[in-house]
């Protein structure tokens, strides 16, 4: 109670973030653009279960479709091969065990 009443209210341990939708998240893409692209991917591909990230994170589309889209949709992120399979794969290759494949190029912000 002491911490909440006297310490936290006067001296918050965590400063307010200075991030807005215009802040750059990926090189050449802002937070707003990435979240918007992720929402589009989540809606178009009905991301509800598990997304297997089979593309390198160096590709912006892989971050959008394989990380941010599952987060905004409340789905799981699977990291193969040890993580198993998902219902959707984010991959540059069509030879994957998932039934639906999303190319990172199609999800770039």
Image: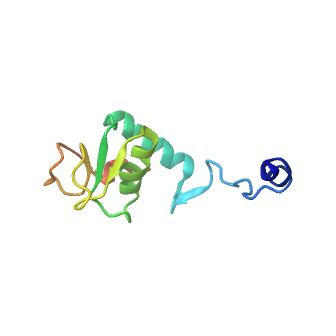
With respect to residue 95, does 71 lie above or below? above
Scheme by which the image is coloured: rainbow
With respect to residue 46, does 71 lie above or below? below
Where residue 8 sits in the image (x, y, percent)? 79, 52
Q: Which one is in front, 80 or 47?
A: 80
Where residue 59 sits in the image (x, y, percent)? 37, 61
Residue at x 74%, y 57% (from the top left corner) = 15
Identify the residue at the far front of this view. Answer: 1
> Residue 23, located in which quarter of the rendered image?
bottom right
Quick check: can you spot residue 102? Answer: no
Judge from the rendering whether residue 52 lies leftward or rightward of residue 28; answer left or right. Answer: left
Judge from the rendering whether residue 93 lies leftward or rightward of residue 46; answer left or right. Answer: left
Quick check: can you spot residue 37? Answer: yes
Q: How many marks?
A: 0
Q: Which one is in front, 9 or 49?
A: 9
Where residue 97 sits in the image (x, y, percent)? 14, 50
Residue at x 25%, y 59% (from the top left corner) = 80
Residue at x 30%, y 47% (from the top left corner) = 51
Where residue 68 sits in the image (x, y, percent)? 44, 49
């Amino acid at each position: 109670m002491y911490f909440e009443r006297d310490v936290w209210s006067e001296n918050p341990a965590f400063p307010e973030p200075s991030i807005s939708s215009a802040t750059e998240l990926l090189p050449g893409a802002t937070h707003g653009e990435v979240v918007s692209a992720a929402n589009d991917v989540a809606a178009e591909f009905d991301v509800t279960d598990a997304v297997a990230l089979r593309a390198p994170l160096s590709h912006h589309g892989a971050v959008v479709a394989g990380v941010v889209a599952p987060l905004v949709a409340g789905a799981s992120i699977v990291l193969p091969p040890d993580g198993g399979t998902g219902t959707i794969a984010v991959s540059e290759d069509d030879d994957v065990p998932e039934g639906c494949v999303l190319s990172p190029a199609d999800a770039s912000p």
